[in-house]
Amino acid sequence: MSQRAVRLADLPALIAYHGEAVWLDHGQAAPRRVSHGTAALSARARAPLLVHAPAAARRLKAERFLAFDLLELYAFVRPASFSLPTPKGLAEVLGIVVPPHHDPLVEAGMLHECARLLLAELSALSRQRRRTVGLAWAMARGGWAWGPLVLRALDFQAEGGISTPGINIWDELPEWSDGTPPPEPDHLPITAEETRRRLADLIGDGAEQRAAQADFAAGLTPAFCPRPEEGAPNVVLAEAGTGVGKTLGYIAPASLWAQRNQGPVWISTYTRHLQHQIDHELDRLYPNPAQKAQKVVIRKGRENYLCILNLAEMGAQLASRPVDAVGFGLVARWAMTTRDGDMVGGDFPGWLPDLIGQGRSYALADRRGECIYAACPHYTRCFIERSARRAKRAEIVIANHALVMIQAAIGSSNDEQRLPTRYVFDEGHHLFSATDGAFAAHLTGQEMGDLRRWLLGAEGGRSSRARGLKRRLEDLILDDAEMPAMVDTILHAARLLVSEGWQQRLADNQPLGPAEKFLHTIRHQVLARSAAPRSGYSLECACTPLEPDVALASVALDRALASLMEPMLALAAKLMRRLDDEAEALESAERQRIDAMARGLQRRGDMEVGAWRAMLKALGLQQLPDPVGDTPVFVDWFGLERSDGRELDVGMYRHFLDPTQPFAEAVMKPAHGVVVTSATLTDGSGSEQSWAGAEARAGTIHLPLPAYRLRVPSPFDYAKQTRVFIVTDLDKDDMAQVSAAYRTLFLAARGGALGLFTAIQRLREVHRRIAPALEAQGLNLLAQHVDAMDNATLIDIFRGDLDACLLGTDAVRDGVDVPGNALRLIVFDRVPWPRPDLLHRARKQAFGGTAYEDQLTRLKLKQAFGRLIRRADDHGAFVLLDKAMPSRLLSAFPPDVAVERIGLKAAIDLTAAFLAENVNKWAENRD
């Protein structure tokens, strides 16, 4: 490779905003403001220095262009390290003094200094230098813009010309080893007084002791006492208001029980931000990092972790696919440093998939269950296997709701993988939705396509790392007389599932095979019964009355699935018999591999294909309940999923009417003790019905013993710290009026504002209208579904920038935990009524009608309001732009907060005055 002469000082710098851009050219004394068009033309002519190239290109409304992205350089120099993906964020972590508020011209001038510091740091690198040189060389050959500068910083010529070391970083990763399985935990109880003492120890002598927190911790102890009988766990439903300190509150009894009984407590969350907050709090319990590494494990599904085999195979293909070189090199640098290989929420930067490509990043994890276990050459270095083994001996396992559901639903006959006996479910208000997704069955094109890939692997000569069933099993079944033929039968039947290009064939009315013909008839029924079939939005319809073509197609597909399911289950059974027949001869790793393959076939054959067949039989026999008139076990419907007018999926959907019923059977009843906690378990109404609703959403109504109820109110003075306004003179359906309200309220707060929306299209339209005006006033506007960044990254930027505003929907609301002045205003576009789809209609009918719907809406309002005040010194305003807000929902807000129904001008004036008076740091900085 011939290195181009590239000088850092010669590079231009670019910062793109929604309304304009800032460009700094070599030799200019100061940056200049330019239009999007001018910036895009300049960038295509000369590759600029910038931060987050995909976001810059989107803001310029341009195609991706060659750029010196400082985030790529940062990820290479400081792998597995956090930085906000902004010029200001990078400057701060590099020790550059930055202005307290946005100044685009100053920030553009800092980009060269950021690059200089990173390259100087790379020059001083001593650890793993030779391997780093090898990666840099491979990336440079693949066209990495930073390649020549990085190789020069690494003194590449001193490494021996082009004779560089290899890129096989996996050879240097640490290996794990198996140990004897730990014994079952004991069943010794803990007391409330012991729990209070443990909490005091965690807080420390010099810290403030909070009575409410101690009461909360002590109130959880029943869940850590022996259960009275099989299938009857001790369950505590604990609502702890914001500010109580529930994280340390449940760590105290959980850690006490784990240490006393030599068994793990699983703490499960819904958001990854809370997982890492819990991990941070556990530093108090285990101040020694080495001890903590043994006692605390963060566990997620295997699809979250880097698969070293996938990375190695990507590296082996770089000569034919140089386009992967940059992504490969940056992930390899991270793999050399990472704590646990977690690519989703761990120390893998949330913005890195945006840079290297979401598809490329996701393909490096085992997202389709294609692991070959002990047959993998990297098995003893596998991040997933290391995490699983550490979890067996840990005291505290931090997991997520999805993993707990999947682990319990799949189950295991392997004693070494027994289920936990103690759980703490934080963010318990999300349990219902988590169980709803975990125990649902979707007979759709995408689901069938995923199963086909799992069975057949890559098809049609395509270059892919997808490993089919035959490749994963072949060395295990070579000596068996029957199993190779069974595999061939399975693969033949798998070809009856949808194949590549099925979506276009359905649109062209040319389906192939029984699966595509079934989907084609469903699509026809959905479109025929829709009032607006060309609207561009997702559509659905009831299965009944069933079109004759759908009934006929369902019979044909059922026959095809039977030809697939039967040999899958037969092969699984034969593999399990081999475990028994060869129990003395099989090595531990081989046993685990056979067990995993058998359970994978059983799960997909029974729980997936078997569920599909049950759905089809219900269609064929016309045994479908009316989703509104009856009280069914399941709710079935047909759906056509779209995004921005593009069809993504189509098929039949089946959800439990009450998904907490299988959750109670699979998770709660096998457990001995369970804590379900949240600041918003109940809807705030204070009624018995409110607690009954919490018990129904948590699934405790399906248990033989009633749950303990615990409520500890927030210590915050909401009447003093907050204001709640409902705007009465605005038409919520007039986007011009709604946009003007967001703009003026955000400007009144001078940033620090979160705008919540009930629909993506409304969010995008408001963003389009207000972004330039806010930027003109120095306020950075971030938006979910607009900016080319994931939600966690957007929230990180928002959290670190006092001037930022953020627009989002439910997913952003749930992930926002922003104490301090960075969040001082929340604006909600309308009352967040549940979407009136078929599933909600069935549940509304079964669970209490309007009262059920009111509960769900109060909970959403309560959760949104709860984002506003996170500390005792926080202040903020909550504004709802919907005059139709019913008074019966006002109990979602704290009882001591006066809700004012006023006009928009009054809301703007009162918001500005309240924040100016109370948000002192902001007021001083703005003075």
Image (cartoon, rainbow, N blue to C red):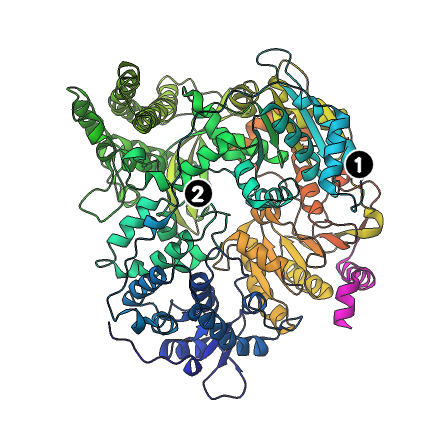
Residue pointed to by mark 1: 212
Main secondary structure type of the part rendered in magenta: helix
Q: Residue at x 66, y 24 (%)?
A: 695
Q: Residues within 10 Å of mark 2 (few under 14, many from 20)?
A: many
Amino acid type, callout 1: Ala
Q: Residue at x 73, y 32 (%)?
A: 217
Figure quadrant of the N terminus: bottom left
Relative to 920, is 653 on the left or the right? left
Q: Is residue 911 magenta?
A: yes
Amino acid type, callout 2: Asn
Residue pointed to by mark 2: 304
Please say whether residue 241 is visible from this viewpoint: yes
x then y, percent, for residue 852: 66, 29
Q: Residue furthest top?
A: 229
The magenta segment: 901-927
In this rendering, the answer to whether 76 lies above or below 383 is below
Number of numbered labels in the structure image = 2
Q: Which mark is residue 83?
A: none
x then y, percent, for residue 31: 53, 83
